[in-house]
Amino acid sequence: MKEFKHFINGEYVGSASGRTFENRCPLDNNLIGQVHEAGQKEVDAAVKAARAAMKGPWGKMTVTERVEMLNKVADRINERFDEFLQAECLDTGKPYSIARHIDIPRGAANFRIFADVIKSVPTESFKLDTPDGLGALNFGVRKPKGVIAVISPWNLPLLLMTWKVGPALACGNAVVVKPSEETPATTTLLGEVMNECGVPAGVFNVVHGFGPDSAGEFLTTHPDIDAITFTGETRTGEAIMKAAAVGLRDISLECGGKNPGIVFADCDLDKAIEGTMRSVFANCGQVCLGTERVYVERPIYETFVKRLAETASNLRLGRSEDPEVNMGSLISQEHKEKVLSYYQLAREEGATVVLGGGVPDVGEEMKAGAWVEPTIWTDLPDDARVVNEEIFGPCCHIRPFDSEDEVIELANNTEYGLAAAVWTENTSRAVRVSEQLDVGLVWVNSWFLRDLRTAFGGAKQSGIGREGGVHSLEFYTELSNVCVKL
Ligand code: NAD
Ligand code: 6OD
C-alpha cells in the first residue's frame, strides 16, 4: 500500500499520531494509498525547519545560485515527467492528453519563469536634492518575506502549487505547503526532486491534511508564518484572511469564479465553438477560469446552442491513459454529489436541458467513479441559482443578448470577478467590451492562453492580489528603501 508522508527538513516522515486518511482514484474509487495527517506537532516541525533554512545556507545564497537551482528543479521535473503525469492523473482522474500539455509542463515552467524574473527585474532608484547641495541616493532592496504558507487546491495540483512555490523560492523564501487532501501525490514527489537538485533541507516542506482543525488551520494560524498564499474557494479564503489578521500577515488569495463567455454575431464561429468547448468542459469543468455562463448575440444564438451541444455530445469519457479520451471524472464522490445537486436544481428552476444532466454509463469497471455528463442548459432566469453560483463541473447555461450594453451588465452582475472570454472579429468592440468587464482576466478569441509575465488574479470575491511576473515579487518580497546621504 502506497503511503504519502510529510516532507519536513528534507526527509519523509509519518505522523506522530499515526493518523492517516485514504486517497482514492476518482475514476473508479479504487484505493491509491494512505495519506498521513499532520497534527500541530508536524506543522510546528515544518515551520521550524523552514525558519532554520532561512538562517542557514539558503538565506546566504546568491541570486545566481538560486536561479541555477530552480532551473535544475524545472529540468528534473521534465526528466521525471512520466512519474508526475501518472501520479497527477491517478489523483485527479484527468486525461493524460490534458495533463501532458498543461499540468506537468507548467509545473516545470513555473520554476523557470520566476528564475528569469528574479535575475532581470530592477528595483527603483531616486536621486534626492538636499539643501547642502550634496544630495542623497535612494535605492530599493527586495528581501525575502520569510516563511510562506502555501495552501493549494485539487483541480490543477502541481501547476497551482508550483505557481506559488516557484516565485516564493526565487525570491529567497522558505515554504511549507499544504496540498489538497484530495491530491497529495505530486507535491509529495516534488520533495524528492528538491533533494535531487540540492535544495537545502527545510526550504521546501510539505504537510498533509484537511482544512479546519487540521493541517490547513494549524499552518495558517501558526505565529511563525510570515505570509499566506492560497488558491481555493472564496469561503475558505475568508477563513484564511481571518487567520492572517492575527499578527498582520500578508495574504494572496486566488478564489472562485462564475465566469462569462460573450459571443458576438461577428465572431469566427468555428473558433468560438472550439474555445467555448475548452472553457466549459476542459478538466471536467474544474478550472477556476472556466466559463459557466455563455451569452450569445441573438442572430447566432440557435446555431451556437446547436453546434456546442453537437460538439459536446462527442466528448469521449474514460480512463486517463486512453489517447482517445478528452474528459475524465470529477475529483471525488463528494464533488459529484454537489454537481448533481445543481443538475437537479437546474430542472427545478425551469431549465431546458439541451444536453446531459445526469450520470453517464461508463461501464462496470468505472461505475463507482465520480462521473457526470457534460451538460448544457438554456432558458433559466437571470436570478436562478444555477446562473449565479459556482458549480465547478462540466456544464454551462446559454442565454441570448441583443446589445453590448446589455451583455456587459449581465456579465458583471455577479459577486465574482475572475475571468471572461470575448469572441468577436471586431477589434474595437473587443477592446471596448473588455475594458468594461469587472474581472481580473479577459481573453479575446482565446481562453487560458497564458503569458506567465502578466498579472494573474481576480476582482471582487474572486481574490485579493496579483501573481505572475513582477507582480509575484510584490507579494513574495519585502521592498525596503535605503536612503544614503551623500
Ligand atoms: P478549498 O477552498 O476547499 O480547498 C483549498 C485548500 O484549502 C485545500 O488544501 C484545503 O484543505 C484547504 N483548506 C480548507 N479549509 C481551510 C481552512 N479553514 N484553513 C486552511 N486551509 C483550508 O478549494 P478546492 O475545493 O480545493 O478548490 C476548488 C475551488 O478553488 C473553486 O472554488 C475554484 O474556483 C477555486 N480555484 C481558484 C483558482 C484561482 O486561481 N482563482 C484556481 C483554482 C481553483
Ligand atoms: O495559469 C495559472 O497560472 C493559474 N493560476 C491558473 C489557474 C487555474 C484555475 O483553475
Image: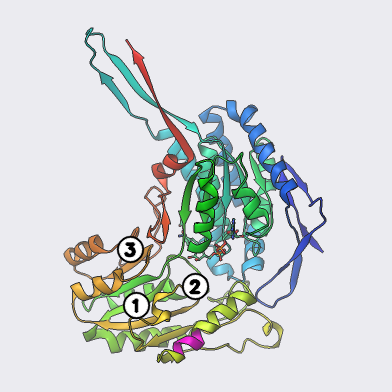
The residues colored magenta run 343-347
Q: Main secondary structure of the magenta part?
A: helix
- The quadrant holding residue 175 is top right
Ligand 2 has an atom within 8 Å of the beta carbon of the residue at disc 3: no
- The location of residue 259, given as percent across then percent down, is 38, 69
- The quadrant holding residue 388 is bottom left
Give the residue number, with chain letter if any, for mark 2.
392
Q: Amino acid at mark 2?
A: Phe
Q: Is residue 353 above or below residue 94?
A: below
Q: Is residue 265 above or below residue 65?
A: below
Q: Amino acid at mark 3?
A: Trp
Ligand 1 has an atom within 8 Å of the beta carbon of the residue at disc 2: yes
Q: Residues within 10 Å of mark 3 (few under 14, many from 20)?
A: some
Residue mark closest to the camera, 3 vs 1: 1
Residue that appears at 50% across and 85% down = 343
Q: Is residue 80 left or right of residue 274?
A: right
Residue mark closest to the camera, 2 vs 3: 2
- The location of residue 222, given as percent across then percent down, is 62, 44
Residue that appears at 33% across and 21% down = 138
